[in-house]
Image (cartoon, helix red, strand yellow):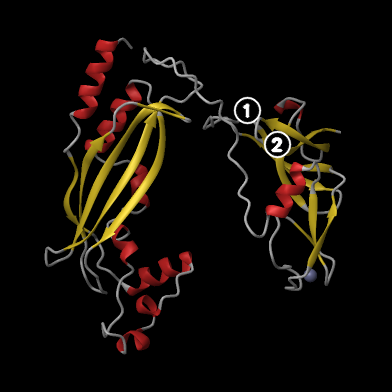
């Protein structure tokens, strides 16, 4: 893409700014207790202001209120959305990006702003507009543009309940040749997604970095478990130690991930559920053979290896 083509492309995408994605549309269902309870259960939310009618009756509100973060929930379409929907400004903008090679998509930010409390029985309407598109940016994921939608939620009185800004990066995935010119910046070589190291599993990953695969063992009943978690599923004891795996195993099930292609990962990685000799199951990559070589019951042997600049992982080879 030369400079002129780039300008024309940017003019085309910028023409979407200000376009309405959804005109003010009332949700199919009013705010209801069933959905609030389900949402709260999924998120482990226990605030009695949302859930406990008796408690709420004694509160300053005198009744339960809807969780403000649910304002976006009420207008959500159901699974029929998977059967397709009429094109709108956002799908047209996305199609324009895709046409020029900006096929990567990554939701980067959601920002909600709450203005008015809602309660059971209120009807929420949403109005969504494409609010802004950034300059062209080079990110670790690839070169592209951030676009942001602004949704405004109102109730049956016409009062604004809140707003939501949703930011999306549309980018040229790095394994495709860049079509835009004049961009000589060297991009960082992507690595695998870093392992999440929380209170309950950091010890396991730290051992992996040191070349060992450990299996958690209940100190009370001796049951082994993986992945790491605080409580024994057999006896509910929270006392544990671990053993080191020999990394002898056999394939119980396997697949090849051909799509999507994920930056930082090998092409067509082979992934298997492996039954370790110790008895626990383990999901890992299989390397050192082709997909056609794989079979259920095949014996494999693991090795803890540096797989990219930042990542150490156990991988399994045919034994
Ligand atoms: Zn136990």
Q: Residue at x 77, y 39 (%)?
A: 296
Q: Residue at x 36, y 15 (%)?
A: 180
Viewer-nearest residue: 7 or 280: 7
Location of mark 1 (residue): 266
Residue 238: percent from left, percent from top: 73, 71
- Placement of 262 over or under 240, stated as above or below: above
User: In the picture provided, is 40 more to the left or to the right than 260?
Assistant: left
Asked whether residue 288 is in view, the answer is: yes
Q: Residue at x 75, y 51 (%)?
A: 281
Viewer-nearest residue: 71 or 313: 313
Q: Quadrant of residue 159?
A: bottom left
- Placement of 256 over or under 81, stated as above or below: above
- Secondary element type, mark 2: strand
Mark 1, other Cα within 10 Å: few <14 / some 14–19 / many ≥20? some
- Secondary element type, mark 1: loop
Which of pointers 1 and 2 lies earlier in the amino acid sequence? 1
User: Residue pushed farthest front?
Assistant: 185
Residue 175: percent from left, percent from top: 51, 21
Q: Residue at x 74, y 42 (%)?
A: 209
Instruction: Answer whether labels 1 and 2 touch (C-beta < 8 Å).
Output: yes
Location of mark 2 (residue): 285
Residue 221: percent from left, percent from top: 83, 70
């Amino acid at each position: 893409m030369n400079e002129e083509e780039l300008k024309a492309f940017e003019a085309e995408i910028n023409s979407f700014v200000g376009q309405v994605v959804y005109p003010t549309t009332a949700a199919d269902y009013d705010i209801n207790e069933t959905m609030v309870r389900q949402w709260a259960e999924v998120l482990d939310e226990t605030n009695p202001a949302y859930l406990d009618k008796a408690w709420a009756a004694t509160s300053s509100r005198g009744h339960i209120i809807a969780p403000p973060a649910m304002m976006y929930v009420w207008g959500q379409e159901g699974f029929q959305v998977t059967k397709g929907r009429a094109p709108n400004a956002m799908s047209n903008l996305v199609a324009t990006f895709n046409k020029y090679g900006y096929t990567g998509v990554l939701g980067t930010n959601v920002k909600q702003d709450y203005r008015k409390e809602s309660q059971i029985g209120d009807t929420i309407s949403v109005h969504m507009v494409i609010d802004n598109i950034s300059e062209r940016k080079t990110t670790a994921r690839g070169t592209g543009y951030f676009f942001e939608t602004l949704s405004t939620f109102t109730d049956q009185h016409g009062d604004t309940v809140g707003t939501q800004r949703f930011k999306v990066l549309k980018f040229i995935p790095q394994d495709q040749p860049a079509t835009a010119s004049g961009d000589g910046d060297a991009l960082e070589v992507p690595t695998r997604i870093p392992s999440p190291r929380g209170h309950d599993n950091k010890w396991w990953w730290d051992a992996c970095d040191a070349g060992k695969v450990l299996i958690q063992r209940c100190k009370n009943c001796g049951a082994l478990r993986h992945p790491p978690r605080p409580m024994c599923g057999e006896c509910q004891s929270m006392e544990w130690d671990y053993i080191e795996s020999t990394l002898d195993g056999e394939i119980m099930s396997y697949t090849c991930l051909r799509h999507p292609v994920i930056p930082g990962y090998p092409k067509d990685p082979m992934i298997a559920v492996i039954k370790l000799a110790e008895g626990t199951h383990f999901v890992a990559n299989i390397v050192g053979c082709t997909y056609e070589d794989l079979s259920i019951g095949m014996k494999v042997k693991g090795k803890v290896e540096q797989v990219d600049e930042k990542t150490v992982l156990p991988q399994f080879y045919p034994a």
